[in-house]
Image (cartoon, rainbow, N blue to C red):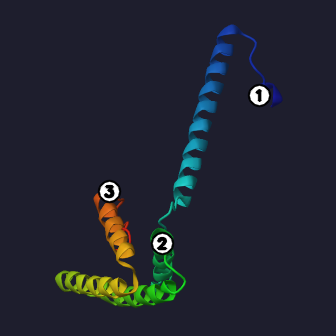
Amino acid sequence: MIDRMREPDDGLSTDLWHTSNKNLMRNLLVVVLCLLGMNLSAQDGGGESKVKKTPEQKAAHRTEEMTKDLGLTTEQVPRVRTINLTYARALAEVKDMQDKEVRKQRSKELRNKRDADLKAVLSAEQYTKMLALRDQDKGEDKPKGKKPHNE
């Protein structure tokens, strides 16, 4: 049995032996790379995970981003967090609505209400910067499902 595993002695068989070993190794390499690629793509979450975030998580993330981008003061952070949480909870309810037009209209109303509430908390400079960042993010090509800044 071990003799079968050894390389044959004649010249023609030797070429076939090396050719079949090369093909076997190439095929094995392709299979390993495919499996590795599938494993990496399954783990690919990037920055945007497919896991649904709770309204509380969304509000906390939005508040952190606003704190960093707008330089919120320690007095502004809790007020902005409350506004963002109220908005995130209301928006979660809206997303369950079946009628697309009603959902779109209600989302717009909520966004306008949130912006008005934020305008009362933020300085004029911070509010202008927030709107500029939002417009900038809307103008960029975003992957599907990625929300513009503070949208």
Q: Is residue 52 above or below residue 3?
A: below
Seen at 24% across and 82% down, the residue is 108
Seen at 33% across and 83% down, the residue is 119
Marked residue nearer the N-terminal end (2 or 3)? 2
**Secondary structure type for disc 3:** loop
Marked residue nearer the N-terminal end (2 or 1)? 1
Q: Is residue 129 above or below residue 142?
A: below
Residue 52 seen in the figure: no
Marked residue nearer the N-terminal end (1 or 3)? 1
- Residue 77 at what x, y percent from top left? 50, 84
Q: Quadrant of residue 120?
A: bottom left
The reply, left or right, for residue 118 in relation to residue 62 is left
Image disc number at residue 140? 3
Q: Which residue is mark 2?
A: 65
The reply, left or right, for residue 82 in relation to residue 91 is right
- Residue 54 at what x, y percent from top left? 47, 83
